[in-house]
Image (cartoon, coloured by chain):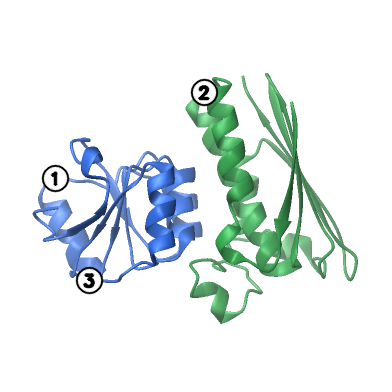
Amino acid sequence: MKLHFDVPGDDFTRAGEASGQVKQKMKQLGFPADVVRKVSIALYEGEINMVIHAGGGEVDVDIDPHCISLLLTDHGPGIEDVSLAMQDGWSTAPDHVRNLGFGAGMGLPNMKKYSDEMEIESTVGVGTTVRMKIFNP
Amino acid sequence: MEYLDADLLYGEELLDHEVHTACGSDMMSDVLAFVKDQAVLLTGLINPQSIRTAEMMDMTCIVFVRGKEPAPAVVELAEEKGICVLRTQHPMFAACGILYSHGLRGGGHI
């Protein structure tokens, strides 16, 4: 099953809508709770990142019985140093984002932690693509 | 609810649900990173992302501390997600301490 979502960049309150819908769909399909949670959290952090840093983007989800693939695409400023961005606590988020409960530098590390495979392609000035896979053993 | 002297903002029918674990944080990524199987989230963050974080973590109850009043849309989102919402005048540290002294535990590990 393939699902597509546009993540609006101008409305922080809506970040997480795609994750919520994917979670609901996976529950209906009978996936185990721990797999559903891994997908939900990884995608949720991705959505938040797209809204905070990139002015929104697009999410494509491919739900297969044994593997859930997440593709997050944005046309934001890109990530200058991906390995630095992957470090716990590293953040370029402005203070107002921290007041919203994010920007602690845990977004990408959390996505890595909850996905079984993750790849980031980013070009400064062009955008960022994140691919994640979560397996259902 | 009684121990925290809390107001119920949503979830009368959810109050019978038994919980054993909780966590307290204003940083949602910390909740998403370090928490496992907690049922209650104590937070001073009253925007919709507190509800969504609880949703992603399968939490059943949110307690807003320091007497903070969430916007009606935030309570409506909790209703949509089936998450009980309480509000207490206690600050975070005190609210966590009260629940801990009555048997709730962290339940998470790094």
- Asked whether residue B94 appears in the rendered view, the answer is yes
For chain A, the rendered hue is green
Q: In which quarter of the image is residue B65?
A: bottom left
Q: Which residue is labeled 3 in the image?
A: B91
Q: Is mark 2 on a helix, strand or loop?
A: loop
Report, in whole angstroms, how far the alpha carbon at label 1 lies from the one at label 2.
29 Å
For chain B, the rendered hue is blue
- Eye-nearest disc, 1 or 2: 2
Report, in whole angstroms, how far the alpha carbon at label 3 lies from the one at label 2.
36 Å
Report, in whole angstroms, how far the alpha carbon at label 3 lies from the one at label 1.
19 Å
Image vertical order of residue B25 relative to residue B107, above or below: below
Q: Is mark 3 on a helix, strand or loop?
A: loop
- Eye-nearest disc, 3 or 1: 3
Q: Please count the marks in the image.
A: 3
Image vertical order of residue A108 relative to residue B26, above or below: above
Image vertical order of residue B106 relative to residue B5, above or below: above
Residue occupying the point 59% across, 40% down: A21
Q: Where is residue B24 in the image (x, y as percent from the top left)?
A: 32, 59
Q: Which residue is labeled 2 in the image?
A: A32
Q: In which quarter of the image is residue A31?
A: top right
Q: Do labels 3 and 2 share a chain?
A: no
Q: Which residue is labeled 1 in the image?
A: B103
Q: What element carries label 1?
A: loop
